[in-house]
Amino acid sequence: MSTAARPADAPGRRRAAPAAGAPAARQGTPRQPRHRAPLAVVPTPTARASSGAFALFVGAVLAVGLLGLLGLNTLLAQGAFATTDLARKQAALDTAAEALQQQVAVLESPEVLAVSAHRLGMVGTKNPVFLDPVTGKILGVPLAGAYPAPAATATPSGAPTAPATAATTTGATTKPTTGATKPPTTNPPTKPSPGTTTPGSH
Amino acid sequence: MSLFIGRLLQLQAVEAPGYAARAEAGRLRTVELLATRGEITDINGTVLATSVAAKNVTVDQTLVKDPASEAMALAPVLNIDAATLVQKLTGTKRYTVVAKQITPQTWGQVKALKLPGIFSENTTARVYPAGDLAANVVGFVNGEGLGAGGLELGEQSILAGQNGSDIYEAGAGGSEIPTDTSVQHNPVDGITIRTTINSDIQWEAQQTLEAEVKASNADSGTVVVMDPRTGAILALASAPTFDPSDPGAAPIADRGNRAVSDIYEPGSTSKVMTAAAAIQEGTLTPNSVITVPNTLMRGGRLFHDDVSHGLEHLTLTGVLAKSSNLGAIQVAETIGRDKLYGYLKGFGIGQPTGLDFPGESHGILSPPSKWSDAQFATVSFGQGLSLTAVQATSVYATIANGGVRVQPSLIAGTVAPDGTFTSSPAPTQVRVVSAQTAATVRDMLESVVSDQGTAPLARIPGYTVAGKTGTANRVDDSCSCYRGYTASFIGFAPADAPRLVISVTLQNPKNGHFGGRLGAPVFRQVMAFSLQTLGIPPTGGVPPKMRLVAP
């Protein structure tokens, strides 16, 4: 500050000198004060401009800060809104998924499966029968299934066991393999896993 | 002026915390986070019982201006009678429940009606996707969603879980204001119970049993399917059964599990224990000859067999195959009452099975010191002692498993909410008779299903089958006397390497009463189905030639 003030002060004194008149002329240097006077004005606005910019700067920082805070709060609030929104959506999807899972559980329950199997013309097995993939032997005594009357339930029980017991008296306790061994020997490649030869399922 | 300053100070400094607290309380919301009740599944994970989100419809009666029109609008959606609804909507109560446990979809429809005063609250509903499948095992829940029967009751503490809560500050729209005051306690979901039940076998057992109970006009019946090597119960059917989603519609007796709670006098199926005891004690062999007269006097009572016959010379095998009461009396007399009692106890009669199922009975076996001579005689052929169907099945499982009784089990393990499976502790095992005795008895039991035996209907072509019929006099509670019969058949297959034991019991059938006639066909049907389902091929074994009568 003091260095900036000095040039301003110096010309001032020199201007005062010609106003005093005689002493300046006596010193014999009249040219110099005229050239120095315009220089003195320039620095003054520079000093004023710098203090205004500072205020502007502080104001800007404040504004940015406030705006930032506002933005941050808005973001947070928006996050909360989004959370609420998504939670609602999730709840809706959860209930939809639950309803579908329930539907699947019902559809794959034995009762429903049995009814649809029956509708497709399938019957339960009377005698469990297996095919040995290595030897090609049939294990068990195959028995043709009989499709019960449509009115009957999918599971034959009680009365429908009659044909099975008829088979029991003829083929019981004899070795199950005799006679049935030949045809299946060609089968193993196409039927690698043990399964029923009678048309049936649960 | 100083008045205003004073008031300002009062509001801003002195009472400020109080106002702040009131404002916060107005914003604070507490939401109960419901724990999901554990599921009950079968051995393969097929769901037998599960919980789903549901809504309770509530009403603030003070906000309902026109109960009649609101009731009319609600009635078709909620499927509740309009008159009942009017009653529920009329009054000055700020809160009352209109409908319980409706689906979220139905609530969506109710909400769309935009009726003033109608609100909802979150809840859960228990659903049984497989209907009455294994209902007597799974059980049911009460109106509060707590277990009230079966495994739902027995495993309540494991299934239930613990509700959590969420406390937060909410804006006018109900959405959360992000502050540090929110506290969340996560709910702890219940643990899933995996039973040993095989849904398919259970279903087959239920269907077959139900049909037979109807056909024979029996009061009730049970089927138990057990793996003798592990004690795991694959099916536990009880008929008549009930609908677990509407337990109130069925009589109390149908809601329990007869196979573990109903005790009965087993009759002839019990003779296998008498025979095993005599063989183990070395007093008799399968071919020992027992002279069986037409009648026998014991303790002042005259005993006779089912069918009147002349003097017979049966082998021990013949006594079992022909199910002779008089033969069994003489077999028991070779070892004495104390030893017989010891073996009966060893086979689990009068003992807890270890299932710890709600309502389970241990059966009745009085100590031998209290037996009259007549009771000693009756106990030898299965009257004068009581057991449950599971206990009876366990006796045959012991023979099938080489003389070692494995504690029966219904729970394979638990599945934590994170999916980790913990299997149940290994069942306890007790040796009752030697492996050799068990093998001998198995051979003898194969003769029961022969043409000369009492149960040829139990045969499955291709397989070796062993078993025993029971046609017992039944104790009628209404008169405390013997009236009617208990018809049963218990057997296993393949006889030479048993994988499955199945018991069929029919209480008080009025259309026929012989175990070989009523029980054996059910056994055959369920056994054939189970062998096929589990992929158990025939062993190729041949039934041993056993002598039934003395040469």
Image: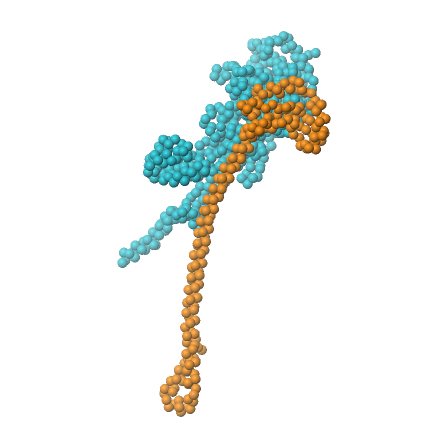
Chain colours: A orange, B cyan
Q: Quarter holding the C terminus of chain B?
A: top right
| Whether residue A135 is situated above or below residue B34 in the rendered picture | above
Q: Is residue A33 shown left or right of residue A108? A: left
Q: Quarter holding the N terminus of chain B?
A: bottom left
Report the residue at 27% width, 56% height from top: B3
**Depth check: B249 or A113 in front?**
A113
| Whether residue B58 is situated above or below residue B360 in the rendered picture | below
- Residue most extreme to the top: B310
Asked which quadrant contains residue A48, the reply is: bottom left
In this view of the protein, can residue B532 be seen by the observer? Answer: yes
Report the residue at 64% width, 16% height from top: B453
Report the residue at 55% width, 38% height from top: B416
Q: Is residue A168 shown left or right of residue B260? A: right
Task: Indicate the position of residue B166 as horizontal and vertical percent values.
Answer: 45, 44
**Depth check: B348 or B27 in front?**
B27
In this view of the protein, can residue B348 be seen by the observer? Answer: no
- The number of callouts visible is 0
Q: Is residue A11 shown left or right of residue B440? A: left
Task: Indicate the position of residue A108 as horizontal and vertical percent values.
Answer: 55, 33
Task: Indicate the position of residue B333 as horizontal and vertical percent values.
Answer: 62, 14
Q: Is residue B305 shown left or right of residue B156? A: right
Task: Indicate the position of residue B43 as horizontal and vertical percent values.
Answer: 58, 32
**Depth check: B447 or B163 in front?**
B447
**Depth check: B494 or B131 in front?**
B131
Report the residue at 58% width, 9% height from top: B297
